[in-house]
Image: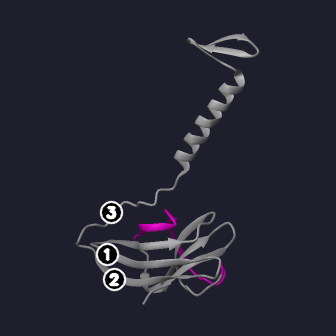
Amino acid sequence: MKIIDMNTVTINTVTISPKSLIYSLLLISVFFLSACSTTSTMMVDDMADTEAMVIREAQFEDADASHQGSGDLKILQNGTERTVRFENFQGTPGPGLVVLLVENVAGKNKSEIGASVELGDLKSTNGNQNYTIPEGVDLSKYDGVMVYCKPFSVVFSRAAFK
C-alpha cells in the first residue's frame, strides 16, 4: 500500500480514495459479522438411536401473550443417559434464555417455580434440540420444563409433563 496524498491510496496497481476504502472495509465487516452471528435453525439430531425410550411427554404452551412457545417435549432414556428433547419447537426470542427442569411449571417467576435444574442455554428459538439431564437428578421431583429468561426473571414458555 502506498499513500500518494491525503486523497489517494494505491494498493498494488489499484488506486482508490480513502473514503472508498473505508466504505469497502465497512461493507466487508458488516457482511462478515452478519454471517457469523446468524443462529442456525437446523439442529443436529444426536438422539437418532432407536434404543432411546420415551419416559415423559409434554406440549409447550405460551407463558403469556408476549412470551410464546409451541411444540413437543420428550424425556428420552438410553441406558443411564436421559435427555430432554424439543421437537418442532417454536418460541419467542429473548435475551439470556435457558432451559429449566422445574418443580412447579405453573410458576410465573423464579420464586414461584420452586426447585429447578438448569439444563443449558436455549440453543435455538425453533427446531429440534436436545439437553442432557445431569446424573442424579430425580425426575419425580419435577413437573415440567420451562424456557426462562434469566436477566429479567420471566417465563417464556412451559411444558407440563402428562
Please state the extent of the stretch shown in magenta in the rendering.
109-135
- Does dot 1 land on a helix, a strand or a loop? strand
Q: Amino acid at mark 2?
A: Ile
Q: Which disc, if any, is residue 46?
A: 3
Q: Which disc, if any, is residue 77?
A: 1
Q: Amino acid at mark 1?
A: Gln
Q: Residue at x 58, y 71 (%)?
A: 92
Q: Position of residue 71 (x, y in %)?
A: 45, 78
**Residue that numbered label 2 is attached to:** 55
Give the Cα distance between marks 1 and 3. 13 Å
Assess whether residue 129 is covered by the magenta stretch: yes
Residue found at the very far left of the displayed protein: 51
Do labels 1 and 2 touch, CB within 8 Å? yes
**Could you tell me which quadrant the C terminus lies in?**
bottom left
Q: Earlier in the sequence, mark 1 or mark 3?
A: 3
**Could you tell me which quadrant the N terminus lies in?**
top right
Residue found at the very far bottom of the displayed protein: 162
Q: Nearer the viewer, mark 1 or mark 3?
A: 3
Q: Is residue 23 left or right of residue 68?
A: right
Q: Position of residue 118 (x, y in %)?
A: 53, 70
Q: Amino acid at mark 3?
A: Asp
Give the Cα distance between marks 2 and 3. 18 Å
